[in-house]
Image (tube, helix red, strand yellow):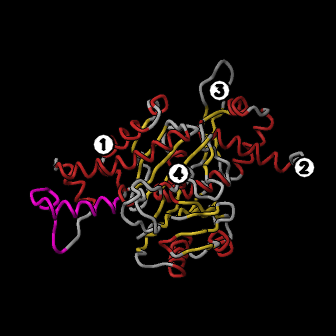
Amino acid sequence: MAFPSKATHKQTRAHNAALVLRVLFDRGPISRAELARLTGLTRTTVGDVVSALIGEGLAREVGRGPSTGGKAPILLEVVDDARHVIGLDLGEFVFRAAVVDLRGHIQRSIERPVGGLDGDRALEVVHELITELTGGGARGTLLGIGVGTPGIVDVATGTIRYAANLDWQDLPLGEILRSRYDVPVRVANDSRAAALAIQLFSERRSSNLVAITVGRGIGAGVVLAGELFHGDSFGAGEIGHTVVEPDGSECRCGRFGCLETVASSRALVARAQEIARDHPESALAKAADPDRALTLDDVVAALEAGDEETRRAVVAAGRYLGQVVATLIGVLDIERIVLHGSMASLGEPWLEAVRDEAGRRSLTLLSQRVTFELAPPIGDLVAIGASALLLTGELGLAVGR
């Protein structure tokens, strides 16, 4: 068995720089003395690191703090726009790309409809978006490119193993983008990217988190002990294809009765169509139009109008999701669960159904400590989370508390 060798001087410098930057990011404005105390580094080391960060434009002095008896200390903070990342959200119908700063603020964003596009044509749209945002070439303050995509992603290489909607199989997207734009590239599953955005940029920080995307598809991003968890085969969080009705409808994955067939937005809208047909007195029947299909917005409107049939359908969808969440609670014992995606627009009735069913089906000692919440209004979670892949991977910013 080979043991790791002693860290090189370069590795030690990089570690110290990441440590100081991490504290500056979380605690700034802060003095050099306080940085030394919180990092455990010597004042000399902190001074050298800070000088380097200032020289690179990543940190700056912002005046003096209160005196504790001697000379008032000079305070430091991270320069939020010192670096930028291009984050991509490769959705089912729309590809979005955004320029994001170090605080997760979107500086500019563009999107392209991709309904019906797959394979090489979908890849061309990715290039079009990046090229437009970089002005033809990656340069200046661009730290790198992050991508959040549906499917199974080998995060070590940036290879998309399987993305059914895009007809991508074993696509080395990370290498393709690195070669073309000559910057670091990180690629991850979209649900895990969204979890990273919530963990890094929401006001509440915790070491563990489950963030569940519920839209046309359903997936979970898991943060364990401050690290994004991908699984041995990079498929952690694929809960949408957990069977909850063995004799249920066929899923797009080819199996029957998957969670997505009963708890996704497409499943709920399909149920809304049935309600509109079978209950002419319902709000959904009144919203139905021969010239267009019902949408999730119609379901939300009917729910807010107090339509009982709609409420039952919404609660049923929430309870199916809660059934699977109960398993996550039992396996992971995580106390913070965040729900996001288009189904979150259903609000408290849906959230309460998820919460109640999860509590009913899991050990009380565990479930009574779990908090369920809707995602904070951060913005495009996948694009921001994709950019966060670079901030954590390239700059060493911390995910956990």
Of the residues shown, which amino acid type is indicated by label 1? Glu
Instruction: Measure the C-alpha gap from mark 1 to mark 3.
Output: 49 Å
Q: Which badge, 1 or 4, comes first in the chain's sequence?
A: 4
Numbered disc in front, either 2 or 4: 2
Residue 333: horizontal and vertical position, in percent? 54, 37
Numbered disc in front, either 2 or 3: 2
Of the residues shown, which amino acid type is indicated by label 4? Gly
Instruction: Measure the C-alpha gap from mark 2 to mark 4.
Output: 34 Å
Tags 1 and 3 touching, CB below 8 Å: no
- Residue at the image position 57 percent from the left and 54 percent from the top: 236
Instruction: Measure the C-alpha gap from mark 3 to mark 4.
Output: 44 Å
Residue matched to label 3: 72
Residue 179: horizontal and vertical position, in percent? 68, 74
Numbered disc in front, either 1 or 2: 2
Of the residues shown, which amino acid type is indicated by label 3? Ala
Q: Which badge, 2 or 4, comes first in the chain's sequence?
A: 2
Residue 77: horizontal and vertical position, in percent? 61, 41
Q: Which badge, 3 or 4, comes first in the chain's sequence?
A: 3
Farthest bottom residue in view:
121
Numbered disc in front, either 3 or 4: 4
Q: In which quarter of the image is residue 60?
A: top right
Q: Is residue 87 left or right of residue 42?
A: left
Residue matched to label 2: 1
Residue matched to label 4: 221
